[in-house]
Image (spheres, rainbow, N blue to C red):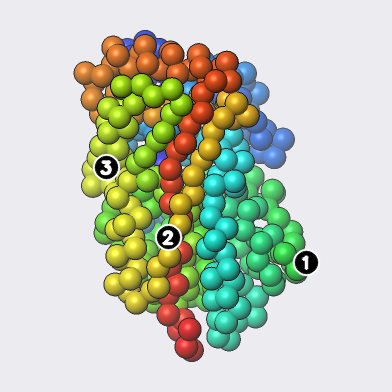
Amino acid sequence: MRKTTATPADMARHVGGIPAQPGRGESVSLVEAALPPSHPGSGAEADPEQVIAGAGPVGRSGERPTVRLRDAGPDEQPRYAPEWLELREPADAAARSMELLDPLRIRLANLPGRSGLAIHDLGCGTGSMGRWLAPRLDGAQHWILHDRDPYLLHFAAVASPRAAADGSRVTVETRRGDVARLTPDALLGASLVTASALLDVLTREEVETLAAACAGAGCPALLTLSVAGRVELSDPDPLDDEIAAAFNDHQRRGGLLGPDAVAVAGEAFADQGATVKVHPSVWQLGPENVGLTAQWLRGWVGAAVEERPELAERAEAYLAARLAACAAGELRATVHHSDLLALARPTGGAG
């Protein structure tokens, strides 16, 4: 349910300055205290020059970077490292749109026949969406956390908030798997569906399935931090636009929506009778985000080179210069995302 974001080993051969993907045992778990002792990434030291497993948008050869609307197979490996999710959480929290919360609160307050909220968080990762949203909503909440990775589910449950904005109780349960085929029945009783960084790794068919499921259940959806395909860097470089275009093409591979996701999702939810609201959610990265910016840069450039290998030689020098500026605290990056709120017609009453 998450982006396939590991950098492939052959990237190091294509671009000497873009390191190969470390194995899960090669990256230190920054949230090790909250993870089971058997976590395969625990106990190792991270190389700051390596891409954290799960950081950046590049997939392993032959692997499709998208949610699969089925249960994960027993041998299917997790795709996001908790290190990456923890690293990006502050930037995600700062970026999510506050402007969409008031219409969401109004809809939730007027849902018919509900006592407390049942919130399904799709691809919950380490639970950052719940930590951001639950304390901003009133009333008792029960969060159903969906993810394929049992270690991330464990962390999400342990680190979940315990109180709503008005002090009401927040409880959680976890469900392993990639949201086995979404239907209105699967969301029976849902008050809200949430997700972060999900829409851009779906196909049109998968987005339409999600929209139909939410409409059938009569529940709104708050889908945040979908890539918008626009990046602005301080001290502009002629290669910026080429890297961005190649990255966007990479995001669209295999029929995935990438930067077109929010527009497609807006149409899909509107076709189901939902009222759709979209608002920017922008990462503003500066000297206080050096670690995140460096990891994002490696993944961003790596994806571009994977898509257009002819960029490799120039991209190596470009990345080295950008990373040097980042380390010196001189680089600022604006990475555009969008948040989407879809207010489906409630079932069982007017809305």
Residue at image coords 56%, 17%: 327
- Residue 146 in percent (x, y) is at 51, 55
> As shown in the figure, which amino acid type bears the numbered disc 3?
Arg
Q: Is residue 170 visible?
A: yes
- Residue 221 in percent (x, y) is at 47, 65
* Mark 3: few/some/many CA within 10 Å (<14, 14-19, 20+): some
Q: CA distance from mark 3 to mark 1?
A: 43 Å
The residue wearing badge 2 is 278
> As shown in the figure, which amino acid type bears the numbered disc 1?
Gly
The residue wearing badge 1 is 167
Pick the front one: 180 or 246:
246
Residue at image coords 66%, 35%: 31
> Is residue 258 toward the left or the right of residue 325 in the image?
left
> Is residue 199 toward the left or the right of residue 121 in the image?
left
User: Is the C-beta separation of discs 1 and 2 under 8 Å?
Assistant: no
Q: Earlier in the sequence, mark 3 or mark 2?
A: 3
Residue 252's disc number: 3
Q: Which of the two discs, 1 and 2, sits closer to the camera?
A: 2
Residue found at the very far right of the displayed protein: 167
Q: CA distance from mark 1 to mark 2?
A: 29 Å
Q: Which of the two discs, 3 and 2, sits closer to the camera?
A: 2
